[in-house]
Each structure stands twice: as structure tokens, then as C-alpha cells.
Image (cartoon, rainbow, N blue to C red):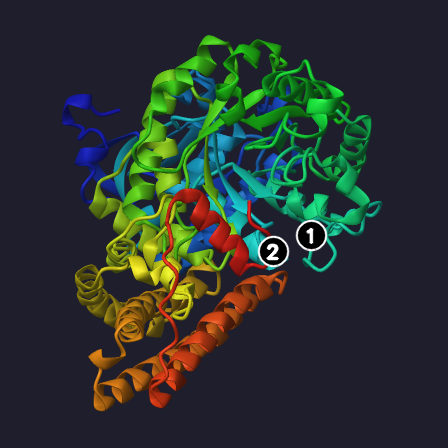
Amino acid sequence: MRSQKRATTTRAKSRGLPPLLPTPKSVRRRRGELRLPKVIPLFVPAPTSLPAAASDPALERSVLLAAQALKRQWSEACGAEIAIERPATLPRGGPAIVCRIDRRAALEPKEPTARDAYRLVIGPRGIELSAPTLHGIRYGLNTLGPLAQRGGRLPALELLDQPDFRDRGIMLDVSRGRVPRRATLEALVDLCARLRLNVLMLYVGHTFAFRRHPEIGAGASPLDAETILALDAYAADRGVELVPCLQSLGHMERILSLPRYRKLAESDRRWSVSPSRPETHAFLAELYDEFLPLFRSKRFNANCDEPFDLGRGQSALRAPKKSPGELFAGHVEALSGLARRHGKQLMIWADFAYKHADQIPRLAPDTLLIDWWYEADFDADRIATLRRHGFEFWVSPGTSAWNCLFPRVANSEANIARWADAGKRHGATGLLNTDWGDFGHYNTLGASLYAYAQGAQNAWSGAAEAANFDRALGRDLFGDDSPAYARIYRRLGAIHDAGFRIFNGSALQYLYFDGVDRSFFHQHADRAALRRSARRIAPVLRDVERMAERPAPGDLGGLARFELAWAAHATALAIEKSLAALDYGDWRANPKSLPAPARRALARRLADLAEQQQAQAEMLQALWLASSEIAEFEKTAGRLRRSITELEGAARSLRANRPPRPPAPSSIALLDVYNEMRGQLGLPPR
């Protein structure tokens, strides 16, 4: 080896290399380069070189798939061909890619993250990839992909890499209206593999076809057992653990609203199941018996978050001496037993555990707690409480995509970075990036890709240089190493100003769906703020239109181009619609404020907006069906129809000079907003 004095060290000084996502921990540039021959052999580790505990057919297939992906990349990039082999002894000869199992290859060999570590050495005579396990071999092959330049040249270097978190993943909500097609879920697995994410959860509340309980998923295009089995195998072959996730306490309104299950509801809210009824755990046991055996994962997320009505209904009568915390701890204890019957470690969200900290010691010691919060400003260091109690725990940021036409990108970036930093300092073993679909899941999967990449980067090696991240995101997600895609995400994701704020969402989303007649949200908008947002969206619209015209890959990135264009046009319409709604509201309050020509002009504006929103509704349905089952699209379609109908009605009122009464004053306090949204979906208030 050359002297380290001649090497250039670390990510910050790895200029001249192609952008990598996630960024490696350490890169030392060396003199010289490797010139690839026309055909270069790639020697994968022989089974005899693996420890007995590492024998896993799915893991071996994942290495083969990574090698095949590398073969395709290099063939397309520079014409070099790779011959994949697994000889008993390594032949001598010309340059080769030699993969070895070596426990010394990790930066921190004693850490659990050493499982995914690897060392990559490129020199004029060949490439050596060593790792403690096949996981690291796979990630090293993944890193090699973009290093080959035109002409088949690779820079000489030594690269050492090891993630900050052992478990790095995404949770996708598939229960708020949108159920992805199997091909979409497989594409999501492929994306996880490219980003070195090794965990995928699908949040299921009612969208699974239970054979013994068919009512639960009826009408929701539910996932079925065959789909889960196939997806589980597909994920395992790509080094991704599909972790079962089934809501088991709160957020069970859809199930508890069905006549067969109403008796299990804790209260008239039909939000949480009642732990005090013996039938509750028998019912959950039946669901688990069908659901959990479909997954090879040894973990199970039972959720158990936000059981707001716990202890306020049946349990107050059946177990009057038990506090909500005691009811919660007892329920989790029962779920731990049910999970163990299937060989699973129980995972739950940590919010209720914090609220009733005196009950934390009652939880089974092997319970894995997931701490979440999705705003940028919060106390991430509270997870020290979980560490003091000796629990394994993960941190869970979010994409900030829900309740938005397009994600609140700056909020998501800060939220992810703060959780990653706190998790590393306090010993979290995992980072789970969540993507929810509140109130109909009109937010698209493509809109979340930037946040997925940010989560992967922060979970592996912390924040990256913007220039490296932007180019790598363009290449890995859109097949084009231009930084323009990442910049569009940030620019579009910064446009949310309407003169008022609503917790955990974008004001412009609420304006987009709000009817101009009721004007629950429009009456809080500010013209100056809307005009500022209008000026900011204009250049973004031009850029997304150009982006949508460029050649697109046939996976998530290809569809994302059109999903971004839809979101940009929807954002522009929300702004223009609210400006028109404010003018319409002024006329309703003072009919003499608008002379006839101005009234007719405003009527044309509103009618034109109705036509635009109708066209956008049709485009949204086309985009939805391109990636998802029809599921519960009607939830969103109904909200759009209401908005369009009220725009048309307002135009007629203006033409007839018959102003309706001004809208009733509204409050945008959290509970009032929540109930307004429930009303738009035809649900009773809380």
C-alpha cells in the first residue's frame, strides 16, 4: 500500500469522484487509476468462506443481484463487461474484482453496524472488496456502480464505510386511502436497496384481506396474503426486511365502525379497542395468526400510538381502579405474548409510554420503542429516557408530505437531521422515516423521494454536501446526474405561505380543497402572502414542465416527474383560487363593492378555476391509478367535486348579482381543523 501521507482523506475532500448516495464515511484518493479490461471477472465469496451463522440463501441471492446490477451499470456506462464467478480458489491473472469476508474490514468492528461495513480498495491491478458479512459485500458492490467513468477508468482509492444506524428504513402508510400496486411496492423495495435502506414497513390499519374477517378490508382494495408473501421474498432477495405492521390499539376507527366489532370499542368515539374486554385480545390473536406468518422478519410493529380515549369508556366501568397508563401497559404486555407465539419481537410507538412514564418498567424488556415527532422544533433528547430504562429504541422522523400538496421540505430536512443526530448520541439502533397519508393520501409517492434520500443519507453517515447529494439524487432516482431535480424539490417544497399556519400541514393544501362558499380556510388567508407565493411558483412551474418532457426511467422516478408537475400546478391553483375567494368574500360582505364589469370578470376567474381544478382532478386520478389500486380515491374525489361545485356556484351568483350571506367565522385551532377535515370526508366531529 502507498503511504497514507499521500492519500487524500474523508468525504469532504473526495472531489473528483462521482457523487455517492449515501456518502461514504472515509475516502482516501491514491495515485493512479484502474483501466478496466474488456472483460473483468467478479469473484463472489464461496459458501465455504462464510461463517455457519451467515448462511442465508436470500442473502446470497442479494449479493448476486447486486453483482448483476453492477454488470448492467458498467456495460451501459463504459462498455466494460463483468463475468460473475465463484471459484473455490482465486485464479491468478489480470485485473479482477475480488470479494472477501473479513471481520477486520469494519471501521468499528465491535459495533452492531459492522454487519453492513465494507472496505473497497481500487488500484491499477484490480479491486478488492472486503466486508465482515455479505451485507457489506452487497453495499460495496452498490458503491462500485457509479465509480466507472467513460473509457472504463476508475480512480485509485481506499474507501472505508460503515453506517451510523444498524436499521434504516421507510414506513409507508397504506391505510388512509391509497394502497400501492404490487409493482409499485417492488419498485419501492428496489429504491430502498439503492439507498442502502434495509427496513420497509407498510402501515396497515384495515387494508389487508383477512380470510376470517373479510369485512375489514372490503371496498378498500386491500393487500392479500399472496401479495405479502411475494413482496416479502422480493425484499429479502434485495437485503430489505419487510417488517409486519398492524395497528392494535388506537387509530382503529374504520374497523370499530363495522357492526361486528363495535362492541370492542373503548368508547363511543370508536377510536381505540378496549383492553378491558377479553374478546379484544382473542380478536387480535386471530388477526395476528393470519398476518404475522406471512413475514420472515423476527419483528412486529403493533403501533399502539395515540389511544386518546383509553380509560374513558368501557375500561372506566370494567376496570375503574386502573389508570390509562396501567391499561396501556397491560395491553402491550398481552400483545408481547401474542407476538412471541409467532417468534416476533414487539415494536410500539413511544408516545403513550412517555405520557405514562411510571408504567415503562412494566413493558417487556425486549419491547422496541419507536419515538416520533414530525416538526423541526422539538426535544429530540427526550429519548435519553428510553435509554435509561434499558430499552432498544429507534428514532422516527417524517417526510412532511401529508396534509400537503407538496412536502414541507425544509421542515422534513431539519426533522430528519435532528432525529439522526439525537439517535446517534443516545444509542438508537434504527432510524425509520415515515410517510403518512392523512385525510385521503392525495400526496403522491414521488413527492416523498427527496425525503427518502435525506433519511437514507442521515441514517448512514449524517448530512452530506449539497452538491454531492443533489447530483447523486438526480442520478439514482431520475437517471440523470443533474442537480436540477433536488433543487426543484427544495424550491417547490418551500412554497406554503398563505398568511396563516396550521400545525403539521401546509396552508395551501387546505385552500386547494376548501369550498369558496363555506370558506372555512380562505377567510384566514392574506393577499400579500398569497401574492408572494404566486411570484415564487411561476419559475418553478416552468422548470417542472421542462423536467416532465425529459426522458424518464420506468420506475418511481419516471412517474415522479409528472407527480411533481401536478403538485406545482395544484399549488399555483390553490394560490389563485384563494385570491379569488377573498375577492368573492368581499363582494358577499359588501355587494356594492364590485361594479358589473368587475363582477363578470370575477365570475370568469372562478369558472376558469373550476375548469382547471376539474382537469387536475382527472390528472390526479390518472397518476393515482398508475401506481395504486383505486382503493379509497373517492375520498379525495369527493373533496375535489365539492370545491369545483362551489367555484361554479359562486360564478353563477356573481353573474346573477345575488350574493350569498358571508361565511360563518371559523377557527383554525387544531381540533377545529381536525373536525372540519372529518366533515369534508363525511365523518362525525370529535
Give the amino acid type for the residue marked by disc 1 in the picture: Leu
**Which residue is farthest left?**
5
Look at 35% across and 53% down and name the residue there.
506
From the viewer's perspective, tell me whether residue 451 is left or right of residue 675: left
- In the image, residue 444 sits, relative to residue 377, either above or below, namely below
Badge 2: residue crowd in 10 Å (few <14, some 14–19, many ≥20): many
Work out whether mark 2 precedes mark 1 in sequence or the reverse, and give the earlier one. 2
Badge 1: residue crowd in 10 Å (few <14, some 14–19, many ≥20): many
Quadrant location of the N terminus in the rendered image: top left
- In the image, residue 25 sits, relative to residue 209, either above or below, namely above
Look at 38% across and 32% down and name the residue there.
460
Instruction: Estimate the x, y position of residue 126 in percent, counting from the top left.
Output: 36, 38
> Is residue 353 or residue 555 the one in the foreground?
353
| Residue 679 in view in this figure | yes
Instruction: Estimate the x, y position of residue 147 in percent, counting from the top left.
Output: 32, 46
- Mark 1 falls on what kind of element? loop
> Is residue 430 or residue 539 the one in the foreground?
539
Place residue 271 in its image quadrant.
top right
The residue under label 2 is 179
Place residue 516 in its image quadrant.
bottom left
From the viewer's perspective, tell me whether residue 641 is left or right of residue 501: right
| Residue 74 in view in this figure | no
Give the amino acid type for the residue marked by disc 2 in the picture: Val
How far apart are the alpha carbons under marks 2 and 1? Answer: 8 Å
User: Is mark 2 in CB contact (under 8 Å) with mark 1?
Assistant: yes
- Mark 2 falls on what kind of element? loop
The residue under label 1 is 223
Instruction: Estimate the x, y position of residue 237 in percent, counting from the top left.
Output: 61, 42
From the viewer's perspective, tell me whether residue 667 is left or right of residue 89: left
Quadrant location of the C terminus in the rendered image: top right
Place residue 568 in its image quadrant.
bottom left
> Is residue 72 or residue 162 the one in the foreground?
162
